[in-house]
Image (tube, coloured by chain):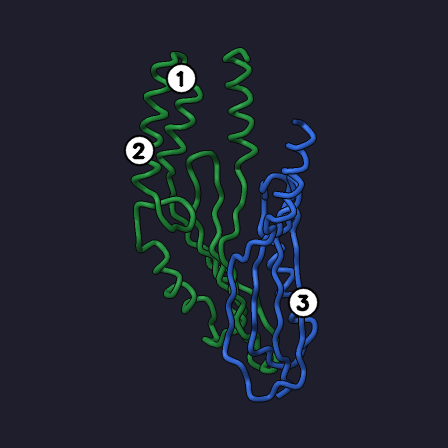
Chain colours: A blue, B green
Amino acid sequence: MLKNTLLLSVLALSLTGCVGLNTVSMTQVPAKRDNIITTKAASWNLLGINFSNAFVDEAIDGLKSQCPTGKIEGVYTKHQTTGYVLMFKREVFVSAYCNEV
Amino acid sequence: MPIKMKSILGLSFLLVGGCSQLHHVHIGDIDQSQGSLTPFTITVNELGFDAAKAAEIGAGAAKSASTSEDLELVAFILAISNFGPKTGNPVYNDAYADEVLSEVIKACPSKKMTGLTSIREATNVGPVSGEVVRIKGFCINLI
């Protein structure tokens, strides 16, 4: 009985989706799209307990550092949460175009 | 488990549960070609309250079984009454986020800004929460 329960649990776990898409957003896409830049920032937590959302700032800094004197346009932002056993990973993926003026 | 131990455990969970929740993030275009940037942050906050969770906590802490059952029923009625899509806990003022626009406009003396990032987040402590809208951005210091 225990063996069946364990097998069923493993099967159910393998069929369960573990990624939750929180938000997606996009800004105006420029005509000039030669230089694409990407960055991401993540934050791990146990049982969904977080004390800060400052990891988002890392993504902004990552974007700025890749285009120090240009315009960052067409910013695509994806915020997702991936669940592992008792652990959750919150991630922000950002891609954009860097255009020098 | 003795009631005192239960209460301590419940209180610890309530305190540890004082956590930050990120609902939404949107990063805007950033223009670093016109001059150096100075960051600014505008935050507005409103008290959120989850009555069903409060009743649930009350049911857990109740000394008699009948009170506990009554509070569980109250929690269930509150939960199904407020069932539906929502972001964070309900608040008592639906216009609290509107002031961000006037605050953002005032943020830059040069009136030129870039890289506006909109963040919707919450800080939860048991059934009570701070429902936060945070706008971060940069003022352009014209050369």
SS label for mark 3: strand
Distance, label 1 to label 3, CA atoms, is 50 Å
Q: Nearer the viewer, mark 2 or mark 1?
A: 2
Residue at figure coordinates x 64%, y 50% from the top left: A89
Q: Residues within 10 Å of mark 1 (few under 14, many from 20)?
A: some
Residue at figure coordinates x 52%, y 52% from the top left: B22
Looking at marks 2 and 1 on the same chain, the residue that comes earlier in the sequence is marked by 1
Q: Nearer the viewer, mark 1 or mark 3?
A: 1
Q: Nearer the viewer, residue B38 or B43?
A: B43
Question: In which quarter of the view is residue A46 placed?
Answer: top right
SS label for mark 2: helix
Question: In which quarter of the view is residue B59 placed?
Answer: top left
The answer to whether residue B131 is left or right of residue A49 is: left
Q: Chain of mark 1?
A: B
Q: Position of residue B95 (x, y in %)?
A: 31, 55
Q: Position of residue A10 (x, y in %)?
A: 67, 40
The answer to whether residue B125 is left or right of residue A92 is: left
Q: Chain of mark 3?
A: A
Q: Are marks 2 and 1 on the same chain?
A: yes
Which residue is label 3 attached to?
A39
Q: Chain of mark 2?
A: B
Q: Tell me if label 2 and label 1 are in contact, CB under 8 Å.
A: no
Mark 1: which amino acid? Ala
Q: Nearer the viewer, residue B70 or B138?
A: B70
The answer to whether residue A23 is left or right of residue A83 is: left
Which residue is label 1 attached to?
B62
Which residue is label 2 attached to?
B77
Q: Nearer the viewer, residue A64 or A9?
A: A9
Mark 3: which amino acid? Thr
Q: Tell me if label 1 and label 3 are in contact, CB under 8 Å.
A: no
Mark 2: which amino acid? Ile
Q: Nearer the viewer, residue B55 or B114?
A: B55
